[in-house]
Structures are given as structure tokens and as C-alpha cells.
Image (cartoon, coloured by chain):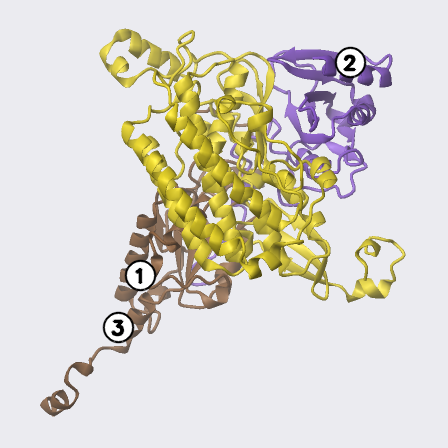
Amino acid sequence: MPLELIDSPDLDAGYREGLWTLNFGPQHPATHTTLRLVLQLDGEMVIGAEPDIGFLHSGFEKLAEVLDYNQYVTIVDRMNYISPMANEIAWHHAVEGLLGIELTPRCKYIRTIFAELMRIHDHLLCTGTCVLDLGGATAFMYAFNEREKIYEICERASGQRFHTGYTRVGGLLYDVTDDWIKMVRDFCKTFPPAYRDFAGLVMKNRIFVERTKGVGVLTKEDAIAGGATGPVARASGVERDLRRDEPYLAYNDFDFDVCCAQGGDCYARFQVRMMEMLESLKIIEQALDNLPSGPVFTSGTGKEGIPDKTEVYRSIEGLIHHFENIMPNRQMPSPKESYYGATESPNGELGYYIVSDGDFKAYRARTRPPSLLHFSLFSRMIKGCMLSDVAAVLGSINIIAAELDR
Amino acid sequence: MSETKSLKESLESKLTGIPLSWSEFRSQQRVTVPASNIAVALKALRDAGMDQLIDITAVDMLEYPGATDRFEVVYLLLNTNSGERLTVKTHVNEPELKLPSACPIWFGADWLEREVYDMFGIVFDGHPNFKRLLLPDAFESFPLRKDYPVKGRGERHNFPIITRAES
Amino acid sequence: MATQINKQLGDNVFLTTIDAAASWARANSLWPMPFATACCGIELMSTAASKHDLSRFGSEVMRFTPRQCDLMIVAGRVVMKMIPVLQRIWLQMPEPKWCISMGACACSGGVFDTYAVVQGIDRFLPVDIYIPGCPPRPEQLIKSIMELQDKIKKTGTYNAREFQFRILPDGPKRFDEDELVRIRERNGFKLEEPKYDPIH
């Protein structure tokens, strides 16, 4: 049966009766987390897929209405949990945009380093588990070796290895130490050989290439009209990267390339992710070389940013400053406006649309999740593929259920 | 800036005589369109180059100081070639919670509109597959409305209990 | 006689009860079923991956079908739509079986005190080990698996006597404000909209 005939209404009823329906998920190893697909199969060919999501819907956006701008960091961490800090940076990027706060150069650089570390973090897991789903367990182990190092870097900076909760409105929880800088430098040294091992194992592996090339193709037109962003869009030839097109943080200062591919298939997406890791490493090295000194908190009108602890304990002004920032009814007022702030998260455009009614907490904070838009394109990508390709396509678009369902 | 002008002109040429209110906040362009004209406006904007729909969301303005309308539906649009962004807002009120679907214009609107319905109960006419997206079908409330409590109304604990002896 | 056996077989024979032998075997060959829903699932992956290597403790054979497993690790929050799935998977697992509730969300709802998240899976399922943390470190998960192994060795599984008297699910008593709300609504009381403050 030619693929373009499947949707036509004059298809004979006998054919439809011959189809069978397969339930995929919600608890399935290839879904990584929790999502469900109802697949329509003609033999082994997938001719239709209806995703069913919401198995991890936990009311993030409702919580945004009761927690203030600093407290909500705890919650956004848990959104895309394979790159937690990227969410924090995106959230506070939007909040600072709304409040009109300009960060200090040191804070910008540290956030940029973390954003890029998170990109590597995310892509390592995505590529590693993508290979795991296709039957290669070794690459997954290689990837996790490097991820553990990034966990340690996060732990050194913030005290928590996973959900760091590291950013604050107008700054960072703590300044980084020289120790931490040395750890990141070490990582920059040890990552390229590990990357070569990983890439050598996978990129030219015939089994892997044959299972991903030409599978799950997303055309450029579909990618744009369907709202795809990030690596998924770039793999389809949409040359767009918020780091370059709408520079935020310190991205203006660095020299890096936007990685694109033309195929739009699983292999292209995989390739884009692999290339982006090296670009991220380039940015981290540049940022470390030029890391400015100075405070990590802005010191504008005094209401943004939490004062240094020694100041809080040693002086009455510092104590008052701390009190003013922490007490719920005395915090910084925000303009009665709405603002959309977006960053290039590892998965695509992660934006927050914040409506404020004047308090230090959002009246409504909407997350623009890249996973949701990408997963809505899934039924287009999978049409005409084989049943075994479902795992490959799911792995290549990197669906994170907590971000998908919120 | 000149491109925003042309966008403004192209929108106003399609909607002559309709009151559009333009505003700007931290260099983000916003336009408010009456709900009855939203389909025409979105079509005109797509034709003027806004080829990507970034997001559709809604805000319940029940407790917002000074708000006159109940729901504000927000469309975030992007021109992938020039990088220009535009926020389109429209308002709907309680008995007539209906808007035309944007699916024929950008098919990416599919799940976004279903989510808005799921969370706020705003119906989109002409949507190909309109039902709840995230919450179970048996769920009756719309949780992101301001009159719904954060902790819910006990739905989360309405399940049978499995004991050690039964399993 | 005994000396004769000793002479012939040396240290190759051990005498024990069947119960102890079965418990020992079961404790050291746990097959976990990773019911990974959220963040904790990634830490579960870390635990199984190269650095922390769960297989050192005899429980690395992750199986994704409940029918082959005897230990369910619920890693991550469980929400309204998921709890029927979780219960069904639990019922599909063969006896004897154990359940680890990994992370604050699975134990108590964690930071997600919202309309959708079940405030602790022990309201609906029997749980053997709770692991605190958001998410717990891999070391904590390994520790809890070792504790579960101790528990299995102590209780004995030959006649499944540790399950006999368990009528209620393990865990804290389940009675809370939500239940109050339901009872009141069932009896037809009109409820005022509760107003929640952020600090509460």
C-alpha cells in the first residue's frame, strides 16, 4: 500500500480491517519516561500513531502562581531533568527580562559555562540512550562516564549534584571557586578523547547508521510550521539558533558555529547533537579563558539580589537588605506587564511567558516546552517506518516527559 | 523596526476598521485583536512572514487588578527568516468560550490548543481532534483557572487501595 | 558418621534450612523493574551505569516487563493518570515481590503538592523501603537495596510468612484533608473555596 493512499477516504474497508493496533507504553524502556503511543500497523509498517501524554502532568504552572521568582527555581529544575541548570537559566532569563535587571559580567559568564555544560550533559544522555535503545549498551556507559564528571562540577558549585537550584534573580547562589574552575578545565581536557571514543563507536557503526539513516524524516516546511526548534529543526535545515540570533547572556563574546544538517532524519539529528557538543566545549574554553572577576550579584537599586553572607552577619545594612529581599511582602515589585523570554535550551527553544500583577511572584508563568511541539510532530515522522524504528525516532527527538507534561 | 512597520501595515490593511491596540514592552511588540477577527488576523500575519507558531497559551484574568475580560489567549509568533517576534492577544469571556482554531494556518497549533482547552476550558472550533491533552478524560475541572485550588478537590486520591494481602 | 562425611566431602557441604537458603538466593538475585517516571529515573540510570555499577550487588538485571521481576523501584512522582498503570504493573508481578519508593516525590509527593500528584504511592500500594532525597544519590539507592536484601534474609520467604499478617499497606496512616473534603462532599455539605497561602 503506497503511503500517500492511506489517508484517502476511498480506501476499501477490507484494508482497514486488516490493520492492527499496538499499544506502546506508558511503561516501556524506549519511552525513557512515561508516554503512550497507540500505533496503527499494517504488518510491521507503522501507518499511524496517536500519542497519549499526560502521564507525568504534575501542575508545574499552577505552582508558579504560588511560589515567588526565586522559589520557583526549585520547580523548573525538575522540568527537563536531564539538563536541570538550563531550565534555571531560562527561567531567570525571563524573570530578569521582566524586571529589567542587567547581570554582572561574571554572572553572565558563569551562567554561560553552565548552560553549555548542560548542553553537553543533555546531548550525552540523549545520544547515549538513543544508541542503547538500538541495542548498543557500551556507548551508554561511555556517555555516563562523562556525565558523572559534570554532576561533580555541579555539586562543587551548588552543593547538589542533580537539581542544583543555583541561579537567583539577578545573580547566582554562590560565586564559584578556583577549585571549580580547575575542575571545568580538567573536564575540557578529558572530554575530547572520551568524545572520540564515543563517536568512533557509533558514528560509523554500520548497524547504527542503517537503523537511523532515512528513518523518521522531518521536512524543513513541516519543521517550521510544526513549531520545531533546536537540534530537531537544525537537523531539518532550519538555520536558527537563539544563541546567535537573539544573543543573551555572554554569547555575543564567543566564536562558535551553528550546527545544521540537511537530512532531517534520525541520523541527522544525532549528528547535530554530536557536533553541538564540540561547539559547546569551544564556548566553555573561551569563557574560562576570559572569566571576568567581580561580584556575581547585581547591585542596582539594592532590591534585586541577595547580599553576601558575611555582610548579613556583620552589618545592620546587610541584614536589612537580606530581610527586604526574603520577606514575602517586602520584595522587589515587578511591572504589571507580560514578557516572553526565551533561551536556546539543549532541546530547543525553552521560553517562559510571564504575566505579572506587580508582586514578586508570577500571576501566570507559562512554559513553552520544546518537547511538546516535537512530540506533536512524531506521528508525521513515524508514518511509513517500521515498528522497530519507533524506538529510534523517539530517542532522536529526545522527549522528556516532565517537560512535555509539566 | 521597519519590518514591524510593514507587519503592522499588512495587518491593518487586512483588518480595516477593526480596533487593534499595539503596545511595546522591553522591545517586545504586542497587538490585541478582537476575538471575532482573530482567524483573519493570524492568516494575515502568516502571509506577512510569521511562519512559525511558537506558543499558544491563555491567562485567567479573574484576580488580575483592573482586568475586564475573563480569559486572555496569547499567540506567540516568530518569523524564522528575520527573527522577528510578535505577541498576539485576544480576549474571551465566560458564556462564549470559543475561538477559531489556528490548525489550518500552522498545524503545530494542534496540541497547544488542546492544552489550552485542558487547562482553561476554551474551545477551539474547527480543530481536527479536539479533546483533553494532559489530564484524564474523566477529569471535570480546568485546573489553571484561578478559582481552582492548587491542591485540587481531592481528585488525586480518588483511587482504589491495593494492600499486601490483595496483591 | 559425621566425621566420615567430613572426611569425604570436606568443606563442600553446608547444612541450613530451606528457608534461609531460599532467602539468601532471593536476596542476592533481585531483578528490579525500573518504574522510572521522572528525575529519579535518571539517577537510577546513573546507578546502573559505569561509575556506580549496581551489578556489584546482584541486582542489575533490569527487566522492563513486570512478569519477570520481583522488585519494583518506583523512581519519580506518580500522578493521577499514572497510578492505575502503576497498580496494574504491581499486580502483574509474581510473588514474592518488594517495592522501593525512590525519592521524595514517590514517598510523599515532595515539592509537588498540587492537584495532580499523588502524595506518596504508599497510599495505594504496599512499600517496603523508602528512600529520601530529591533525587537520592546513587549511593543511597545502593544502600537501600542492601537494606532490602537484609530484610529479605531476615524475614524468610519459604512460606511467605512475612506477607501473612499484612492486611493494610505499609506506611503512614492515610487520612488527610483531601479525604475530609471528599467525605463532606459525599454528605452534601457546601464547601467554601479554600484559600491557600504560598507559605503553607
Q: Which residue is mark 3?
A: C20
- The local secondary structure at tag 2 comes to loop
Estimate the x, y position of residue B128 in percent, counting from the top left. 78, 42
Instruction: Estimate how packed mark 3 is, as few (under 14), some (14 to 19) or many (20 or more) residues with alpha carbons within 10 Å.
Output: some
Residue most extreme to the right: A10
Q: CA distance from mark 2 to mark 1?
A: 67 Å
Amino acid type at circle 1 is Phe
The amino acid sitting under disc 2 is: Leu
Which mark's residue is nearer the viewer, 3 or 1? 1
Subunit that carries the residue with mark 3: C
Mark 2 and mark 3: span between their CA atoms? 80 Å
Q: Quadrant of the C terminus of chain A?
A: top right
| Quadrant showing the N terminus of chain A | bottom right
Q: Residue at x 35, y 49 (%)?
A: C130
The reply to whether discs 2 and 1 touch (Cβ–Cβ < 8 Å) is no
Colour chain A is painted in: yellow
Say what secondary structure mark 1 lies in: helix
State the residue at coordinates (34%, 45%): C137
Q: Which residue is mark 2?
A: B20
Q: Which three-letter amino acid code belongs to the residue tagged 3?
A: Ala
Q: Is residue C83 above or below residue A338?
A: below
- Quarter of the image where one finds residue C185: top right
Point out the residue furthest to the left here: C3
